[in-house]
Amino acid sequence: MIVGFVVSTLNSFAQREITVTEYIDMYKYIAMNEMETSGIPASITLAQGILESGSGKGRLSVEANNHFGIYLPLIKGKIFKVSW
């Protein structure tokens, strides 16, 4: 259910850059659910995602749906490589 919401929300913002407020509105429920599991405050998760992805505007977040700059070169399957 949450994945479908995120995908449809992302599609609606695909034509323009989103604001920080829109980023928070888009991901707050996911962050709150993760807070229940991990104990990491949702505000910290959102702030880190905003910082590392430029509110979802960075290349890694746009092309690989990665908002936290985590790169694991040893996992099998499709890997997104960034040259800095």
Image: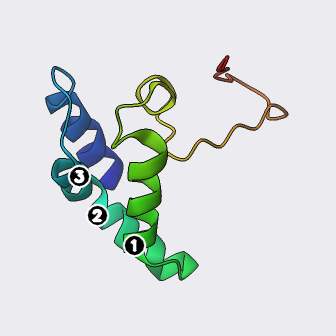
Q: Is residue 34 left or right of residue 54?
A: right
Residue 81 position in % (x across, y down): 67, 20
Tell me the number on the disc at residue 28.
2
Q: Residue at x 33, y 43 (%)?
A: 55
Q: In the image shown, does 37 or 28 lie closer to the viewer?
A: 28
Q: Which residue is mark 1?
A: 42
Q: Quadrant of residue 47?
A: bottom left
Determine contact: label 1, label 2, CB under 8 Å: yes
* Quadrant of image for the C terminus: top right
Decide: few, some or many residues near mark 2? Use Cα within 10 Å; few <14, some 14-19, many ≥20.
some
User: The residue under label 2 is which amino acid type?
Assistant: Lys
Q: Secondary structure at mark 1?
A: helix
User: The residue under label 3 is which amino acid type?
Assistant: Met
Tell me the number on the disc at residue 68.
none
Q: Secondary structure at mark 2?
A: helix
Tell me the number on the disc at residue 26.
3
Determine contact: label 2, label 3, CB under 8 Å: yes
Q: Is 3 drawn above or below residue 77 in the view shown?
A: below
User: The residue under label 1 is which amino acid type?
Assistant: Ala
Q: In the image shown, does 65 or 52 lie closer to the viewer?
A: 52
Which mark is first along the chain, 1 or 3? 3
